Image (tube, rainbow, N blue to C red):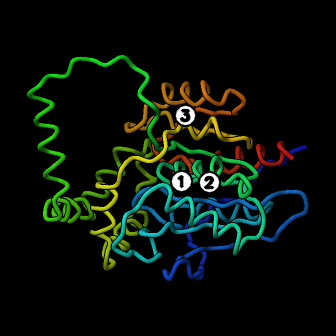
Amino acid sequence: MITQVSATPSNTPIPGTYWQWRGESIYYVQAGQKPSGYPPLLLIHGFGASTDHWRKNIAQLSQDFEVWVIDLLGFGRSAKPDREYSGNLWRDQLHDFITEVIGQPVVLAGNSLGGYAALCVAAQRPSSAAGLVLLNSAGPFSDTQPATKVNPVKKVLNQVTKSIFLQPWASFLLFQYLRRPSIIRKTLQKVYLDQDAVTEQLVDEIYRPSCDPGAAQVFASVFKSPQGEKVDVLLEQMTCPLLMLWGEGDPWIKSRERGAKFREYYPQLTEYYLQAGHCPHDEIPEQVNNLIRSWVIGNR
């Protein structure tokens, strides 16, 4: 019998520590003790976020699991070196962290960009993955639609716009605009259904790392980096259990259409569609925590 987690989500981040990876400092948080029979959980944030974005999940999940939360290189309290950022880089970071620090396969849970990085680990480093939870996960699928005729003027304008934002000065100006607390708040209000979840604490948790040296270069690099492996290719390589949690109110992702694509390539997955936006783990944490807990326990 599965008992529902009932504790109130905590708004207080748990202090973490650092791990040295390829000469760079990587920040992580650990909570909970290792219970027999269940793999640890590794929680991975999305673009612009950090370990703090999982603060409402850690305390509840750590009642039953050993929980690890990590800042991807370039984000949060981790180092922000000037280099090319990609899914392959974060895949290797996560795989090495699991191998060197955690010491056993984990259930990876990732939101948005963190979901794509987690999928890369599960598909391409299967020895590290006991399971995978994707929450409004990012990443490109192969283009299987027939080519449509593009307006030539629009095509030229798109190319010009893209070339402009590949320039360092343009990406820097865009970064400076987007990192303003007022703009962060407006962006969050667009992607959260529950406006009460968009707090000053949340805005500050996203704004603060943007002030670090190197943050603007990370932003520019993500724009310039080539797309990684296609999601359908990764799913065809994967063998571990998969749980999909979709916030249906996400304006950036058409959850039902995208969910159908995931089912097409991985029909054995488990999925839930939730009344939330792009970050359901932060917006409806108790519901997400219970779904993750029940699924992990049910797969043992």
Placement of 150 over or under 69, stated as above or below:
above
The kind of secondary structure element at disc 2 is: helix
Residue at x 73%, y 41% (from the top left corner): 239
Q: Are marks 2 and 3 in contact (CB under 8 Å)?
A: no
As drawn, the label of residue 117 is 1
Of marks 3 and 1, the one in the foreground? 3
Do callouts 2 and 1 mark residues in contact (Cβ within 8 Å)?
Answer: yes
Give the camera-side residue of 226 and 158: 226
| First of labels 3, 1 by sequence position | 1
Observer-nearest residue: 53 or 6? 53
Residue 247 picture location, percent across and down: 51, 38
| Residue 141: image location, x then y, percent | 46, 34
Mark 3: which amino acid? Asp
User: Can you give x and y, in whole percent of width and height, for residue 56 in the image?
Assistant: 59, 60
Q: Quadrant of residue 55?
A: bottom right
Residue at 65% x, 45% y: name it. 287
Horizontal and vertical percent position of residue 179: 27, 64
Residues at marks 3 and 1, CA–CA distance in whole angstroms: 14 Å
* Mark 2 to mark 3 CA distance (whole Å): 14 Å
Compared with residue 155, is residue 100 higher up or lower down, i.e. above or below? below
Which label is found at residue 232?
3
The secondary structure type at the circle numbered 1 is helix
What kind of residue is marked 2? Val
- Mark 3, residues whose alpha carbon is within 10 Å: few (<14), some, or many (≥20)? some
- Residue 221 versus residue 286 in the image, above or below: below
Q: Residue 121 carries which label?
A: 2
